[in-house]
Amino acid sequence: MERNKIKKALSIVFFFAISFGYGQDVIIDASGDRTVEKAYRSARTPLVIDTVIPTVIVEYPLLILKHETQTEIERINPASIKTVEKLPQLYNTYVKLGIGTKLMPLGEVYYDSDRSRKYIYGAHIKHLSSFGDIKDYAKGQYDRTRLGIYGGINEKRYTIRGDFHYGSKGFHYYGISDTLDIAGDSIAQRYSDIGFSGKFITHIKDSAKVNFSVGIAYNNYHSKKNEREAEDLWRARENFFGVTTSTWYKHKSEVYGLDVDIRYNGYRYGEKYKSLTGLDTGLFLNNTIIDFRPHITTRLQNDRFKAKVGVDVAIDVRDVTRAYIFPIAEVKYSLFNDIFIPYIGARGGIKQTTFKSLTGENEFLLPNVELRNENTAYDFYGGIKGTISRRISFNAAVSFAKVKDKALFVTDTIHSPRNKFNIIYDTMTVATIEGSISYQLMEKLKVDAIGKFYSYAALNNSYAWNLPRLEITLRGSYNLFDKFIFNLDLKMEEGRKALVYAPGNGISEENGQYIEKLNFIADLNLGVEYRYNKRISAFVQFNNIAAQQYMRWHNTPVQGFQFMGGVTYRF
């Protein structure tokens, strides 16, 4: 019955669908079997299922490159440490006594303080004289005596230093023939030197603080008094006074500094506006130099690079006051851990010429000379220095400078008997090539070789009188078993020429000037010390081994071969 009803219903639905679709009447008579499944309830919670399309992962494999490397390990010698229960004994006093050929007594005494972190002090006295003469020349005896005392205080934030000195140097103007039979007292001279200096220096480590130093110095220098009291003022008398100050402040890699120096020198000969003879007139010279030197120093790359830049403003106060500006510039860079350090720079300045500085170079000087300050307008220099190994160091440099009022020594032809020297001044350019090399094997062997070549171009003179063209210095010391100490030094000079005022044998003429070529200098000295123990030793010294009686100045030869022996003692 149920199945018939279903058939009937489907027939009706189909009929109406056909009728509406085609607009015609269709009668279908059919039978079928339709089964309806039973409904049931799902026990799961509904979920949203989304489709995910996987992304393809592209892999790029690494290309492996293998480089062959070589590694060298530098061998470092282990440090040697000497362990002792106490420090070696320190002797305060050192005495050296000797005697040489031509009756040359030698005496030296040194005294120094014990080990102290705070106080240092000491004194010394030295004497050397000769009672011998030089063959064919006038009396040539001399003596040298010097006394020095020093002291200082070391504190955490400052340091104080001071010293006092006294010197006496007697000699004779022996540069004349002994056939003239001139009394020794008439050609005798003596220079006396007395002075003191002191300095105060701060060394505060706080970078926010300013450090400074202040120094003072005084010196009195004069020649021998005349025998007649009325002529006591007719000798060289000189007083020097100086003040030096320095201030510096460090900020990061820069150090800012300012130096201010004042140097006064008063030179007197005779009485002002008066004359002793027609050739001796009073000479009064006052000279003050004031220097202002602001500068900046920069250190970079762990101190491998260093540069210093500044100016030197110098005021020269004499009869006429003049101001000058000189460069201060230097740059250097360390390569390969200080193996090579190239450097280049420019400098200049005013060097104060004093009677003491001139007689220190040539003691046979007239007591009445004009003093002019040496003015170096510029000095450009450059070179390279460094250490080839732990034992070998070197330096090679060139420089080119222009110097005004360079002092040159020439034979005095005004005062008889022409056995003294006078000063002339000239402007010149000076080119210098120099090199040095040093070798040191601990405290056993030390060797130094220094060479300098000069080229002078003077404005008013044919040559730079008495100045060498080539200088070579060799020094060495050798310690054999800590018993024998050998010291050797050799000094050679070539190219010196002297200005003379008359023709003669070996005298040439150039530009209206008479020129004498001075001999080549080769001065070789050897010293040997034998240490009996730590306190007592003996020594021998051989001077001028080649026995070359060369002319140190025109018509002023040196002594020939000399021998000296003596002992030393520590206590």
Image (spheres, rainbow, N blue to C red):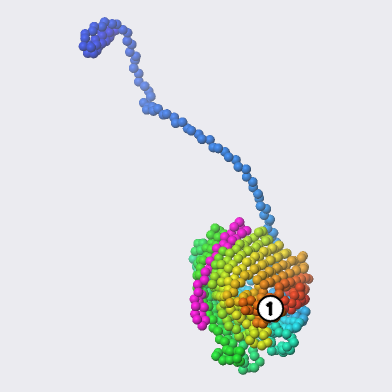
Q: Position of residue 324 (x, y in %)?
A: 50, 74
Front-most of residues 427 and 92: 427
Q: Residues within 10 Å of mark 1 (few under 14, many from 20)?
A: some
If the image is split into quadrants, where does the N terminus sit?
top left
Count numbered badges in the picture.
1
Residue at (56%, 86%) from the top-left corner?
Answer: 284
Q: Is residue 442 magenta?
A: no
Q: Is residue 16 visible?
A: no
Name the kind of residue labelled 1 in the image. Ile
Corner quadrant of residue 492: bottom right
Relative placement, left or right, of 15 versus 549 is left
If the image is split into quadrants, where does the C terminus sit?
bottom right
Corner quadrant of residue 96: bottom right
Q: Position of residue 410 (x, y in %)?
A: 64, 80
Q: Is residue 316 magenta?
A: yes
Relative placement, left or right, of 483 versus 414 is right
Q: Is residue 187 visible?
A: yes
Q: Main secondary structure of the magenta part?
A: strand
Corner quadrant of residue 21: top left
Q: Position of residue 79 (x, y in %)?
A: 68, 58
Question: Label 1 belongs to which residue?
Answer: 507
Front-most of residues 314 and 403: 403
Residue at (53%, 68%) from the top-left corner?
Answer: 328
Q: Position of residue 7 (x, y in %)?
A: 27, 8
Front-most of residues 129 and 30: 129
Q: Which residues are magenta?
A: 314-343
Residue at (59%, 67%) from the top-left corner?
Answer: 399
The local secondary structure at tag 1 comes to strand
Residue at (71%, 62%) from the top-left corner?
Answer: 441
